[in-house]
Image (spheres, helix red, strand yellow):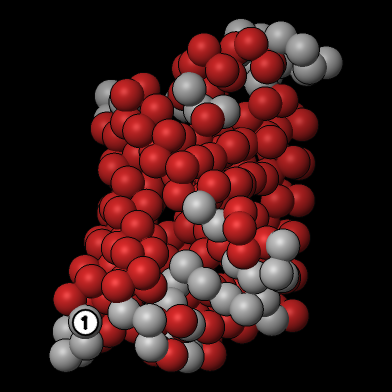
Amino acid sequence: MELLFWAVLIIGAVLTLTRLPGLSQSRNQAIFLCGACASIAFGLMIPVIYDNIDHLLLRTNFTDLFAKLALLLAVNILVGELGRSLHHQRSLHLTGGTSGKVILIVTFAIEMALFAFTDTPRPSPGLGEYINDPLVFAYNAVIVIYIGFLGAAITGPLLRDAMRPTQPLRRAASALLAGGFILAAVRAILLLVGFAVHGIYNLGQDISAISALFVVAGLTSAWLALRKYRIPRITQSHLRTD
């Protein structure tokens, strides 16, 4: 699991850095912020990084709350940008619209409230050591359900785009992204099952990392498509917004 998180961190960080040149021209800001948030979120899930940062904070496991905020923002921005490129209004409303912003704020507010009442004296990324505590379970479930909810909204448009007779790299990008969001839905199901069936929490964490790798691979394919096919359709791809 830790190796998977390292892979997501390294690949995601490298991909995010490729967006730096466009920032000076006011391009790619959203996708750069998305990549930065995702890299922070998965970086903070790596035990050695988590422990070193958590020791600097006033409350044990406060690092996990920062990781979850970064992940919420990354998913919200990504689904919004995908919705924009695919002209899918529902995804745009659920992320950048008034209702989407309210859902995001309420989700994190619930996370903070649940975290405030948890009792976790030892550092534990994702609070996995305490997953059998109902409050910790609810705390983890909120973000997993949020990701699954947004993923479900964009999966259909991505699958339809993957089946269109467009450039192979674009089809691959949409298929990989759809696969990542489908795995996010599987992760949500496993989390709920895991409350009754102990011992599958780590499996769910592995699926989260694999899901993220699918998404990163999809974004990489979109970036390659942008480089190979310099035409208007690709200019508005998953990796570039002006």
Does 62 sit above or below residue 143? above
Quadrant housing residue 8: top left
The residue under the point 16% across, 90% down is: 165
**Image check: 114 left or right of 3?**
right
Image coords of residue 25 (percent x, y): 70, 69
Image coords of residue 147 (percent x, y): 48, 57
Does 56 sit above or below residue 162? above
Does 43 sit above or below residue 141? above
The residue under the point 52% across, 12% down is: 48
State the residue in front, 161 or 108: 161
State the residue in front, 98 or 241: 241
Q: Disc 1 on helix, strand or loop?
A: loop
**Image check: 180 left or right of 66?**
left
State the residue in front, 188 or 173: 173
Residue 152 in view here: no
The residue under the point 55% across, 57% down is: 19
The 10 Å Cα crowd at callout 1, few under 14, some 14 to 19, many 20 or more, is few
Residue under circle 1?
167
The residue under the point 32% across, 24% down is: 3
